[in-house]
Image: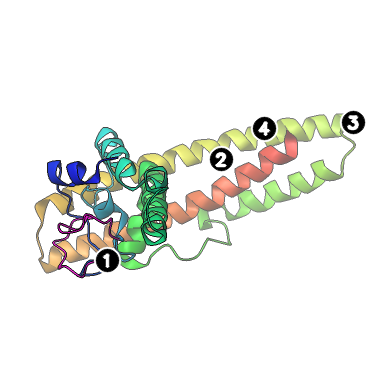
Amino acid sequence: MDHQHTHNSSPRDLQMARSMCWHCQSEMSGEYFCDRCVKVQPVSKELDYFTCLGIPRRLTIDQHQLETKFYELSRAFHPDFYQNKSVSEQTISLANSAMLNTAYRTLRDPIQRAEYLLDLEAGAVKDIRTSPPADLFEEILELQDTLDEYRAADRASSTAATLCVKLQAERATLERRQQVMEAALQELFAQWDALQDRGEATSQTRSERDRILKHMRDILSNRTYVKNIVNDLVATIS
């Protein structure tokens, strides 16, 4: 691969891990190949995934733009193009590719993207919820009892068949709740993006920002808990 050509024809502005080229010590201009020796440079580990893939810190994104940027950077960093290069260049290529792949996997999924943004903005998604949402507490306790009964029952018995029908109904109810949560998340995504687009820094904007983040965190936590219950239910009755 002709790295000199790639570098000159399409300048990049990814944040580098250092201000000087690791190879020739020339000052770096923020691109991922050195202007002087054309050696690939390590992308900073402090770089957030949105910046890494050249998209704004939004929750509704252009998937085509995301894919295009990912494949463009993949061609620049792919380890296959560095097999005949120095050990240092191979190591940098592997690290850059690994970060790029993780960034792409995270941002292409709406839920992972929201969790990542929350972590960036407020450190808000640190712990997985271990207790059911308040409005589901009694329902989840009853469901757990039904699951225990079903596990203990003879699968060929009429009791097991009756319990299975009940569990299937519970599954459908919980999946509808998930859909409601995801619709609420989409509304919050739109609110967050509109706030970002305004670019204001008033106290009212900060308050609105915190409200959206808190609401998003609560819904994501509830969704995670419900999803885990549904997965357990499906694994039990399948």
Of the two numbered discs 1 and 4 in the rendering, the one whose residue sits closer to the viewer: 1
Q: Earlier in the sequence, mark 3 or mark 1?
A: 1
Residue denoted by label 4: 168
Q: Is residue 73 left or right of residue 141?
A: left
Q: Quadrant of the C terminus?
A: top right
Judged from the image, the secondary structure of the residue bearing numbered disc 4 is: helix
Q: CA distance from mark 2 to mark 4?
A: 10 Å
- Nearer to the camera, 104 or 12: 12
The residues tagged by marks 1 and 4 sit, at their Cα atoms, a distance apart of: 62 Å
Amino acid type at mark 4: Gln
The three-letter code of the residue at mark 2 reads Leu
First along the sequence among labels 1 and 4: 1
Q: Residue 23 has which mark?
A: 1
Q: Do the residues under discs 3 and 1 have CB atoms within 8 angstroms?
A: no
Quadrant of the snapshot with the N terminus? top left
Q: Is residue 209 visible to us here? A: yes
Q: Position of residue 107 (x, y in %)?
A: 35, 46
Residue 207 in the image: above or below residue 54: below
Quick one: label 2 or label 1, which is nearer the N terminus? 1
Q: Which three-letter amino acid code belongs to the residue tagged 1?
A: His
- Residue 132: x and y in percent read 57, 57
Give SS at disc 1.
loop
Q: CA distance from mark 3 to mark 1?
A: 73 Å
Query: Is residue 223 rendered magenta in the image?
Result: no
The structure residue drawn at horizontal position 24% and vertical position 63%, both measured from the top left corner, is 16
First in sequence: mark 3 vs mark 2 = 3
Question: How far apart are the alpha carbons under marks 4 and 3?
Answer: 17 Å
Circle 3 sits on which residue?
Answer: 157
Q: Which mark is residue 174?
A: 2
Q: Which residues are magenta?
A: 22-41
Q: How many marks?
A: 4
